[in-house]
Amino acid sequence: MQFASSIIRNDNMHKYILRRVLLLIPIILGVSLLVFVMTDSAEGNVLQLIGDDYTPQQMAELMHEYGYDRSVLYRYGNYMKGLVRGNLGKSFIYKRPVLELYLQRLPATLKLAGASILVAIVLSIPLGIKAARSHGTLIDNGSMVLALLGLSMPNYWLGLMLAVLFSQKLHWFPSGGNLAGWKSLVLPAITLGTGLMATMTRTTRSSMLDVIRQDYLRTARAKGVPEKVVIRKHGLRNALIPIITIIGTELGKALGGAVVTENVFSYPGVGRLIIEAVNQRDTITVTGCLIMTAVLVAVIQLFVDILYAVVDPRLRAQYTTGRRKRGKKQQITTQGAVV
Amino acid sequence: MNGTKQQNDIVLSIKDLTVHYEVDGEVVEAVNNLSLDLREGKVLGLVGETGAGKTTTALSILNLIPFPPGKIKSGEILLNGKNILAMNIAELERVRGKDVAMIFQDPMTSLNPVLTVVDQVMESILIHETSSKVEARERAIQMLETVGIAAERADEYPHQFSGGMKQRVVIAIALACNSRLLLADEPTTALDVTIQAQVLDLMLKLKEQFNTSMIFITHDLGVVAQVCDEVAVMYAGRIVERGTLEDVFNHTKHPYTEGLFNSLPSIEDRTARLRPIPGLMPDPTQLPLGCTFAPRCSYATEACINTRQTEIGFSESHFALCSRYAEKNFVIDRKEID
């Protein structure tokens, strides 16, 4: 860890991180515009859905209050005005700030995502290594068939089957909610983790297969390095880049709310919040949640990129020279403009 | 008397080694019935073209033939009197890097890209000699300095070094534990000529310093003349001629060795055309029954193609695998030099 922090303390790394954080601004702008326009152009708004309870007079007032009597751009501008002040708006349905709703659901989603990724890492990396080392044997083929199976099972089906078996029949775990502590986490985590495990096992295997043929493993063996250390220290670390990429992407997906899994188990996470909001045309909640998710994903990607630099010194060099390259590029474009 | 004395200072003795690679039902006969001895402090040049089985021979000495597809079919490799091929994995790990070390051919791919060079050099010291990280690091830095890499650069990564510097790191790794036997697999082939000379000087100096025995694999006869005491010429998995440097260079016997010398440019006659050996090495999955070189040999007879060759001795040290010497007056064109 000391090693990692020394890399981040590196001056150029600082600048790199700052640049990436600033990059969040256009990302948020882009995502919010896209999401806002898309949810807005969906048929029917929340007011029409709950319209029966209001008189035409009240309805018109509400339409005015939410800006539905003006153009999309006006509403977007209004929304952005709030957003720069950290205000994601107020839910039509719950009558509470969207940010508050989101933060209330986030811990559950974090727990679920964390648990499934953790289980997937612990199981799939050793399995992938084993498969690569016994390339072409029964173990290799068997684990690849299992991985294919894991990939092809849709989460809604797997979730239901797990619920039927372990909840209805065996009564080991609850079939939904999150009132039973860690027990209510088990089935959703397995459901979400199965696909993850399959992807990660396959990635680990193919990445290790690549590394296992490298000459530097032979160099290590020729030094008398025990086989276990050859694989762990010399092999795995070189195979790690694609695995980290997968973990990052999958973690991002899971944090955006595992929509299907959370719904099968009525698990009160962000994914379920988004679905509830969509069903009730609560566009402002949907928009807010998606923007928050986009920010979270971008932050995770930043961590992934920093991890690359920690794992692979060759990539570290890229970060430190990155700024100079950018400068050169700008020079060329300005020259082009002058000509 | 003399015999026992020689027995004692023999570092490496390979007897009847046969290594095959089995791929898709085909058998590649990489090394066939190879035998050789190496005495303490001597450098044996293993010469031959690509695919002759030189690297396979060296990897066998570490018992590092990749399995599958490689397999040591038969033979004995005695290192300091102990049979490498009969060792279990724990015994092998104690020998590798300690009693026998190897300098690998391609410095670009032989170093681990995610570890600093000092880490890679000190690794074998930590395994075999000391458990103190500080001491191992100190010795590794010393070794790096010995091969001409400044201590300040010890914590850099392989991608920060040039090809020649990487080769030095590879050499430092192999020298880290002062092994009695060093296998150098074309240590200078990837380098340009000026760096090549520096690296060769360095290796010879280190050999003197530590009294190391060395197997020097190369296809460069000039390098052989510069560093080797003894020479073994390999062709299609067999040693076709072996002897002292003088035996092989000045009293060449085997037609293949002659062909190798003929394909060198001559410094006296710069306008002379090179005379390459016609044809290609035989397909190692279908080696001919008789002499493997016969199809390309200008001296070959019907008998050469169809019957197994026997090794013929010319002196106590000089042997060639060519049956035509059974005939009384057979000589090759290359003149003997006294």
Image (cartoon, rainbow, N blue to C red):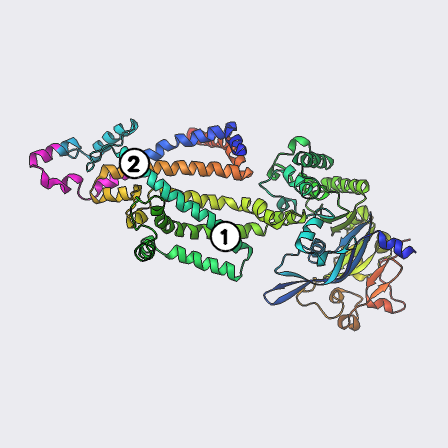
In this rendered view, identify the residue nearer to me: A209 or B97: B97
Q: Quadrant of the C terminus of chain A?
A: top left
In the rendered image, residue A264, in percent from the top left (x then y), is placed at: 29, 50
In the rendered image, residue A33, in percent from the top left (x then y), is placed at: 28, 36
User: Tag 1: residue type?
Assistant: Gly
Residue A104 numbered tag: 2
In the rendered image, residue A109, in percent from the top left (x then y), is placed at: 34, 41
Q: In this rendering, would B173 be left or right of A203?
A: right
User: Tag 2: residue type?
Assistant: Gln
Few, some or many residues within 10 Å of mark 2 (<14, 14–19, 20+): some
**Range drawn in magenta:** A33-61
Q: Residue at x 21, y 45 (%)?
A: A279
Is residue A100 found inside the magenta-colored segment of the image? no
Mark 1 or 2: in front is: 2
Few, some or many residues within 10 Å of mark 1 (<14, 14–19, 20+): many
In this rendered view, identify the residue nearer to me: A208 or B204: A208
> Which of the marked residues, 1 or 2, is nearer the chain's N terminus?
2
Q: Which residue is outermost to the right? A: B1
Q: Which residue is outermost to the front? A: A171
SS at badge 1: helix
The part of the image, by quadrant, that contains residue A65 is top left
In the rendered image, residue A95, in percent from the top left (x then y), is placed at: 20, 34
- Whether residue B262 is visible to the viewer of this picture, yes or no, is no
